[in-house]
Amino acid sequence: MLRPVDAEHIYSNPRAEFARLERAGALHRLAPGLFAAVPDDHVGRKWRPPLEAVALGTAGTGGHTTSSALMGISAARVHGALPRALNVAVVAVERHRNTLQLTDRKAAVLFVRRAVARLDVQRHQTELGQGWVTTVEQTLLDLIARPELGDVQTLREKPWRP
């Protein structure tokens, strides 16, 4: 994840440089002021990173990589319990953060304030880097305790059928 504010020590005008890189296909805009580096083999082609990767990467911006973890419905997706992504990703974070509306799709990243150090987590590798995700057991406990996070209720009412 890249933000123009993080590149101020490299570029004299990082916003203009990021706009140029986006036009060239090297950066993908996720939300205002938030970009993902496009993999080399996708430069110049249509590419969009998975929602869970975006959520984990977004939570880790600004040096918060150790104090965030995918949880709830997003962790269930990572563990293979859901066959498709929903329009919301849930991330546990140490400090309050507002919900992030993505501009590259109709989706949002919901940040839930939790003591991440007290959660049972494991490392997870995504297209955008690595971070933490709650274990299967912790994910199950989270889904039972707070089924409204990530619109799990809708999944129960309209389950996915292959």
Image (tube, rainbow, N blue to C red):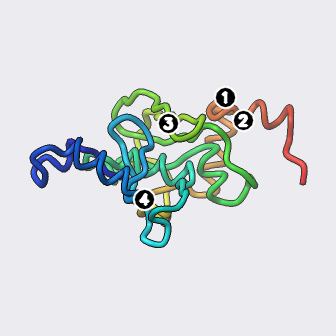
Query: Which residue corresponds to mark 1?
Result: 148
Check the image and report above or below for 146 versus 62. Answer: above
The earlier-in-sequence mark between 3 and 4 is 3
Classify residue 134 as left or right of residue 147: left
The earlier-in-sequence mark between 2 and 4 is 4
Q: CA distance from mark 1 to mark 2?
A: 6 Å
Asked whether the residues under the numbered discs 3 and 2 touch, taking CB atoms below 8 Å apart as contact, a structural biologist would say no
Query: Which residue corresponds to mark 2?
Result: 152
**Within 10 Å of the Cα at label 4, are there few (<14), some (14-19), or many (20+) other Cα atoms?**
many
Label 2's element? Answer: helix
The earlier-in-sequence mark between 4 and 1 is 4
**Within 10 Å of the Cα at label 3, are there few (<14), some (14-19), or many (20+) other Cα atoms?**
many
Which residue is located at x 31 percent, y 51 percent?
2
Which residue is located at x 40 percent, y 40 percent?
93
Query: Which residue corresponds to mark 4?
Result: 131
Check the image and report above or below for 57 versus 143. Answer: below
Q: Nearer the viewer, residue 31 or 81?
A: 31
Label 3's element? Answer: loop
Q: Amino acid at mark 1?
A: Glu
Asked whether the residues under the numbered discs 1 and 2 touch, taking CB atoms below 8 Å apart as contact, a structural biologist would say yes
Label 1's element? Answer: loop
The quarter of the displayed image where residue 62 is located = top left
Label 4's element? Answer: strand
